[in-house]
Amino acid sequence: MSTNISYTAVGSRGTERPVPLWAERVARLIPLVGLPVCLWRLPIGFGYAMGGDNTPSAWWHIPYVFGLSLLTEAFALLGFGLVRRWGEVVPNWVPKLGGRRIPPFAAIVPATVGGLLLLGLMVNWVFTAFRIDGSPGFPYAPGWDMLAMTVSGLLTLWGPLVLALTYGYYRRRCRPDA
């Protein structure tokens, strides 16, 4: 039995089948949920503890924090591959592989594994934020702990969003009746 879900599709952007509007919006949301925690880290790299324990400054803190923030956003931007042509066909500028069709599970498996790992981060956040099972909570001064909980809580939405986007990619690429 086939269920026909009515939805508005956005322009195909070269994809084999139209991308649902909700998937396009989720892909755009993923980098935004990671941005607050990336901005939260920046003062810490410069030695400002943001309500936490002061740690001795080291030369590598600034490049580490900037690198971690850039890497976080780069991985978040990979979610666009689940709604764009470059997630279905290797771009032509890639030597020897350009123009080849990407097998759907070459994107589905890593996205699912990543989404599940990020979902584990969400479970850890819930235990920490609500001090479940003896968790000490966030190691920040009052007020700062609420800000840390909010910023990191947004990041925990990344896992479910990636999993939803992956399911949409699977339906679009692997199910002819969807």
Image (spheres, grey):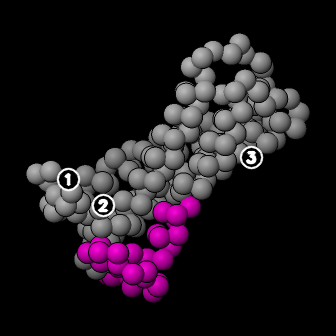
Q: CA distance from mark 1 to mark 3?
A: 40 Å
- The dot on residue 150 is 3
Q: Amino acid at mark 2?
A: Gly
- First along the sequence among labels 1 and 3: 1
Residue closest to the eye, 6 or 91: 91
Q: CA distance from mark 3 to mark 2?
A: 32 Å
* Left or right, residue 114 beside residue 105: right
- 45 magenta-colored: no
Q: Amino acid at mark 3?
A: Thr
Disc 2 crowd, CA 10 A, few/some/many (<14, 14-19, 20+):
many
Q: Residue at x 38, y 50 (%)?
A: 111
Name the residue carrying label 2.
87
Q: Nearer the viewer, mark 3 or mark 2?
A: 2
Instruction: Report the magenta residues as a range.
Output: 1-29
The spot of residue 113 in percent (x, y) is 39, 44
Name the residue carrying label 1.
94
Q: Are marks 2 and 1 in contact (CB under 8 Å)?
A: no
Quick check: can you spot residue 140?
no
Q: Residue at x 75, y 39 (%)?
A: 148
The spot of residue 53 in percent (x, y) is 78, 20
Relative to 62, say whether 10 is above or below: below
Q: Amino acid at mark 1?
A: Val
The spot of residue 125 in percent (x, y) is 65, 39
Q: CA distance from mark 2 to mark 1?
A: 13 Å
The spot of residue 8 in percent (x, y) is 47, 85
Looking at the image, the residue that sits furthest to the left is 96
